[in-house]
Image: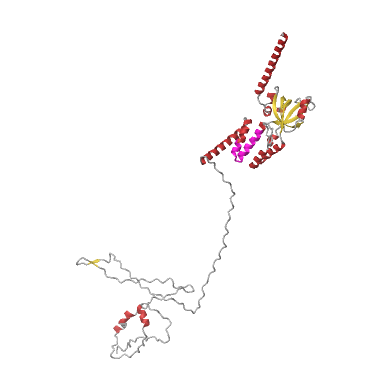
């Protein structure tokens, strides 16, 4: 009985001890700080004597050796290259930045078989240590493969590479479509976060802030230390906030509907009408040289008497009584009549002289019957001869001449006398010598 109790007691102690060790390892794994390949490459001296674990993406075998400065020689070690697990290898700059200085010992057959069976673009985890810092670089030896993950589909990689190229050329809509076609099944979260970061950047460039905000939030969950993700996330959040404020300002409970964009039609320029030819100038017919211009009868215009305007000089007063005396009436001066505007002009361009208007007296004289001229008679003795004093005195005219005959400048002049009429004889005043006898 005592032996059984001692055996059970020892077994319980052993179980407790192993459980304590297991619990300590779990706590150590929980407190393990995540180490990335970029940190090891930046500070290789910090990881020379301490093993660490890395998450890598296998690229392929290499043949880089330096037996003079390192322990790695081709007969003892094999060489391969790998990227960090979260590397955005769909970008050219990241694709060429793989680390080609990974080595494993050829005597370790299990490790060798595991690494040789890996295909390119396969994720895995390895326990490593830095063996040399020759030439300022980290020469890393792989001690053990702890985990082998999935392989990146080359079709998804092709879509991501094409999307990055389209975005660089400004075709953001097609770039977003290519990113959607990359499914990324069984890829690690940090690699998916890189793809979401690229999607958010392209969506911001395509003026889709809501989609960019959703993609960047997913990237931020896995890459909280990435400064580029933080900057893009702040930018997308600001644009979404401005967009929602504009939607609220349009009206309560109403979402503004963006009208479909229609390409403006090209304006059709109206055809100009053909120019109208200018009318040819019409020359007036040339009048014959012997033709006499015909003038239309012009109605005589009665002159309008001007009203006399009294002036201070005209006003006078009677010296005896002191009463004002009206100024003597003055005869109104005739206003010369303006020639009518419709008087035809001479074909040559010179104005036609129009005769002065005929008066009533001139019309009566023109219509009176013609009288035969009286024959001159010899002077008789009874007729007194004019004296020398009377030689300069003109003969007295008839009393009716002042009343009946108009001024000479108002009578129409007939330049072509008829053949039947004879000019009247000149008046005979007698012989100057006969008056003396």
| 14 lies above or below 214 | above
Q: Position of residue 183 (x, y in %)?
A: 68, 36
Work out whether residue 196 can be spotted. Answer: yes
Q: Most extreme residue toward the right, as rendered?
A: 75
Residue 162 in the image, given as x and y percentages of width and height: 68, 40
Q: Residue at x 35, y 78 (%)?
A: 360
Is 305 left or right of 293, judged from the image as shown? left
Looking at the image, which residue sits at the far left?
Answer: 320
Asked if residue 335 lies left or right of residue 134, the reply is left
**Is residue 11 placed above or below 206 in the rendered structure?**
above
Q: Which residues are magenta?
A: 192-213
Report x, y in % for residue 239.
57, 38
Residue 347 located within the stretch drawn in magenta:
no
Q: Observer-nearest residue: 191 or 49?
A: 191
Identify the image's colour scheme: rainbow, by chain, secondary structure or one colour.
secondary structure
In the rendered image, the quadrant that contains the N terminus is top right
Q: Magenta region's main secondary structure?
A: helix
| Residue 99 showing in the rendered view | no
Q: Nearer the viewer, residue 64 or 117?
A: 117
Horizontal side, residue 346 vs residue 76: left or right: left
């Amino acid at each position: 009985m005592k032996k059984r109790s001692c055996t059970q007691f020892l077994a319980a102690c052993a179980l407790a001890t192993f459980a304590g060790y297991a619990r300590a390892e779990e706590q150590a794994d929980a407190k393990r700080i995540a180490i990335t390949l970029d940190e090891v490459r930046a500070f290789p001296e910090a990881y020379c004597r301490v093993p660490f674990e890395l998450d890598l993406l296998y690229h392929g075998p290499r043949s880089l050796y330096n037996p003079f400065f390192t322990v790695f020689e081709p007969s003892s070690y094999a060489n391969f290259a790998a990227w960090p697990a979260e590397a955005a290898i769909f970008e050219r700059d990241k694709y060429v930045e793989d680390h080609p200085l990974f080595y494993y010992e050829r005597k370790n057959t299990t490790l060798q078989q595991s690494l040789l069976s890996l295909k390119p673009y396969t994720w895995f985890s390895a326990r490593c240590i830095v063996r040399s810092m020759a030439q300022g670089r980290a020469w890393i030896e792989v001690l053990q493969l702890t985990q082998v993950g999935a392989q990146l589909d080359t079709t998804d990689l092709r879509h991501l590479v094409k999307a990055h190229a389209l975005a660089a050329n400004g075709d953001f809509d097609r770039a977003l479509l290519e990113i959607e076609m990359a499914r990324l099944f069984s890829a690690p979260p940090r690699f998916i976060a890189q793809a979401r970061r690229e999607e958010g950047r392209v969506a911001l460039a395509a003026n889709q802030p809501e989609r960019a905000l959703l993609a960047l939030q997913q990237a931020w969950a896995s890459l909280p230390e990435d400064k580029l993700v933080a900057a893009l996330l702040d930018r997308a959040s600001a644009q979404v906030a401005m967009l929602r404020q504009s939607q609220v300002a349009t009206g309560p409970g109403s979402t503004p509907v963006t009208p479909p964009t229609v390409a403006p039609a090209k304006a059709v320029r109206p055809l100009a009408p053909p120019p109208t030819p200018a009318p040819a100038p019409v020359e007036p017919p040339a009048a014959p040289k012997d033709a006499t211009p015909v003038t239309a009868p012009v109605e005589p215009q009665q002159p309008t008497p001007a009203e006399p305007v009294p002036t201070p000089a005209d006003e006078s007063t009677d010296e005896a009584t002191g009463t004002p005396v009206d100024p003597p009436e003055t005869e109104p001066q005739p206003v010369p009549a303006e020639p009518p505007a419709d008087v035809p002009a001479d074909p040559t361009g010179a104005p036609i002289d129009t005769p002065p208007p005929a008066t009533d007296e001139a019309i009566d004289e023109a219509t009176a019957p013609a009288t035969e001229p009286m024959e001159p008679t010899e002077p008789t003795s009874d007729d007194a001869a004019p004296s020398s004093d009377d030689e300069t005195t003109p003969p007295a005219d008839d009393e009716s001449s002042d009343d009946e005959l108009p001024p000479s400048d108002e009578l129409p002049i007939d330049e072509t006398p008829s053949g039947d009429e004879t000019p009247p004889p000149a008046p005979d005043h007698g012989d100057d010598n006969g008056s003396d006898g």
